[in-house]
Amino acid sequence: MAMDNDEAERAKLAERAGKLFSRRVEFLLSAPQLKFLPDPTVPEIAFCGRSNVGKSSLLNALTGRKAIARTSVTPGRTQELNFFEVGEPTQFRLVDMPGYGFAKAPVKVVEQWRKLVRTYLQGRPVLARTLVLVDSRHGLKDVDRDMMRMLDQTAVGYRLVLTKTDKIKASALDAVAAKVAEEMRKHPAAYPELHLTSAEKGMGIAELRAAVLADAGV
């Protein structure tokens, strides 16, 4: 059966994204404070979500690397903005952000992370899109909604991405996805497409790669 034009374009984009991510993807720097941010010379795609939502695992899956982003069973391990460059020359950057919600760290340190994240998201001129990761086993929590409201208020466009979809039964996943999609439609800055992913099984990874490429304008 022949593909329509939209499907053909999506297939081309997915193929191009796969090729780009298979080439140069390198860690650039960690920024514990805003003064350490790299020069805003290329588009940036930020990854945010509750602590232990699977950001590092998803980044590893997207880039096809086993450990470009460190994974940990300890929530709150990522304490800086971690920047990764994609392409040669660099086409865009991926930004791994500190997890929000629960973190095994002193209150003052957690507040510093929050301020860093909030200021970056609200004022970074090259931020092309934010991916808000949500654990499919739990659905949206109040801390996710707080983040979504903040992004709405500052007109920062974002995509909702369900993670760890292999850890939940299909019927339960359908219910969670429907509920998240319904709530997502009430948020003006949310992109009208929900992404279902599994870093472990590879589900939805090619599609998300293509979406990142489109958002970066590459």
Image (cartoon, helix red, strand yellow):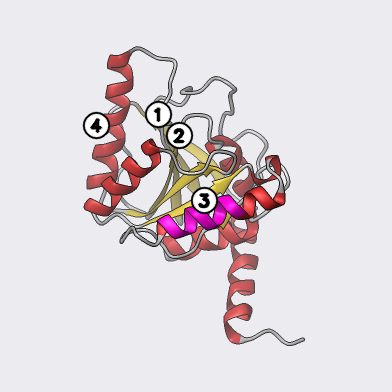
Label at residue 101:
1
**Place of residue 9 in the rendered image (x, y in percent of width and height, measured from the top left):** 58, 78
C-alpha distance separating marks 2 and 4: 25 Å
Answer left or right for 92 relative to 209. left
Label at residue 50:
2
Q: Residues within 10 Å of mark 4 (few under 14, many from 20)?
A: few
- Nearest to N terminus: mark 2 or mark 1: 2
State whether the magenta stretch is mostly helix, strand or loop.
Answer: helix
Element type where label 3 sits in the image: strand
Asked whether residue 178 is drawn in magenta, I would say yes
Residue 31's image quarter? Answer: top left
Q: Residue furthest right?
A: 1
C-alpha distance separating marks 3 and 2: 12 Å
Answer left or right for 6 relative to 46. right
Residue annotated with mark 4: 35
Q: Is residue 166 visible?
A: yes
- Nearest to N terminus: mark 3 or mark 1: 1
C-alpha distance separating marks 2 and 1: 5 Å
* Along the viewing direction, whichever of 35 and 48 lies nearer the viewer: 48
Magenta residues, start to end: 175-183
